[in-house]
Image (spheres, grey):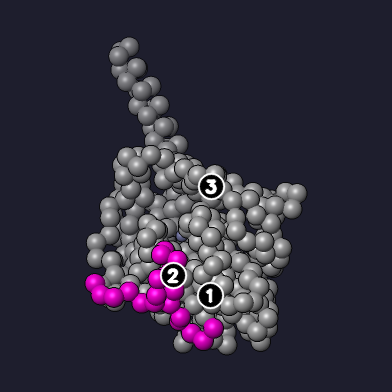
Amino acid sequence: MKLWKGASVAAAVLAVLIGLALAFAPILYAEAFMGPAWLRQLTAPPSQAGYDARPGPAAGTVAEGYWRVQQIAPATWAIGEPQNDPDNYEYLLVGKTRALLIDAGSTTRDMRPVLAGLTSLPVTVIPTHLHFDHTNGLRHFADVALIDLPQTRASFHEGRFHLSRYQFMHLGQAGGPPVFPVTKWVKPDGVIDLGGRQVQVLSTPGHTATSVSIHDPAAKLLFTGDLIYTTTLYAFMPDSSLSAYVSTADRLLATIPADTTIYGAHCCRNDAPAQAPWMKMNDLRDVRQAAADIQSGKGRGRGLIIRRFPVNSRMTLLTLYPFGNR
Ligand SMILES: [Zn+2]
């Protein structure tokens, strides 16, 4: 009888621990993500086959022995980091009076010499979101624009922005996260005027709550950061939301013209040699459908806690069990 009672208590404790682990899965996974390689390996969902770029010469030219620079439209360049594991792409949009750099790089290297080779105008940087692979290079810039939301204002003290643990998502960063000024607070849907070229800063939560996309309507370009790119989308982070993915996609699909080209922040397409990761609005439609299917229980995923769901022939989406998704 005593043994039976002991077993019941142990089972109850185990059930509570499992419940807590599931409830706090985004936080636990975030910690594992920032932890040692073996822990990351252990908690990683099954890998996605077949999303590498096709063999062949990569688009663009190498600059400073590190960056890959590719012109994608008039006065518009993609700047890739093929040597860096998250394979980031930043984008430079040049107007008549100033330029806008979308994301500051995954590396702590200084990108300014590359930019100086493309424009002599002053450069404003806007990160699409606050993760390390989009903000690391901000340490080199004095003119930084940021979406004006209560969550971003909360990290701004004495004229500088201080990235929190789960905003930056990288504990092993030498020198720690960058601390940077914010020179322009941009309201959701606010416009940045580059001189003869106006771009709109759209609040596009999903990957993170404060993520933005940059819309250049005249050029028919939409830069989406990590909301949507051409490989594996992360919708399991502490700040991710599947329902926000659906509502953001709905809003973009209703307001952005269908012939707009999307550029995401991570390479590559699996149907071409390495190049800036471009997509069509239909890819966003596919992501919206996948997110809605996961929410309704129709989507078929693989994985224990973080689960991988198909989106289309080149994209998958990582997220939690339905009860763990917001
Ligand atoms: Zn990223």
Q: Secondary structure at mark 3?
A: helix
Q: Which callout, 3 or 1, points at the residue further toward the start of the chain?
A: 1
Q: CA distance from mark 3 to mark 2?
A: 32 Å
Q: Which residue is mark 1?
A: 117
Magenta stretch: give its range: 55-75
Look at 54% across and 77% down and name the residue there.
118
Q: Secondary structure at mark 2?
A: strand
Q: Which residue is mark 2?
A: 63
- Depth check, mark 3 against mark 2: the one in front is 2
Q: Which callout, 3 or 2, points at the residue further toward the start of the chain?
A: 2
Q: Hey, what amino acid is under mark 1?
A: Gly
Q: Residue furthest top?
A: 2
Residue 44 visible, this angle: yes
Q: Are marks 2 and 1 in contact (CB under 8 Å)?
A: yes
Q: CA distance from mark 3 to mark 1?
A: 34 Å
Magenta stretch holds residue 66: yes
Q: Are marks 3 and 1 in contact (CB under 8 Å)?
A: no
Which of the pair 308/186 is nearer the observer? 186
Does 186 sit above or below residue 169? Answer: below
Which of the pair 131/118 is nearer the observer? 118
Q: Which residue is mark 3?
A: 166
Q: CA distance from mark 2 to mark 1?
A: 9 Å
Q: Hey, what amino acid is under mark 3?
A: Tyr
- Depth check, mark 3 against mark 1: the one in front is 1
Look at 39% across and 77% down and name the residue there.
60
Q: Residues within 10 Å of mark 3 (few under 14, many from 20)?
A: some
Residue 317 visible, this angle: no
Q: Secondary structure at mark 1?
A: loop
Label 2, ligand 1: CB separation under 8 Å: no
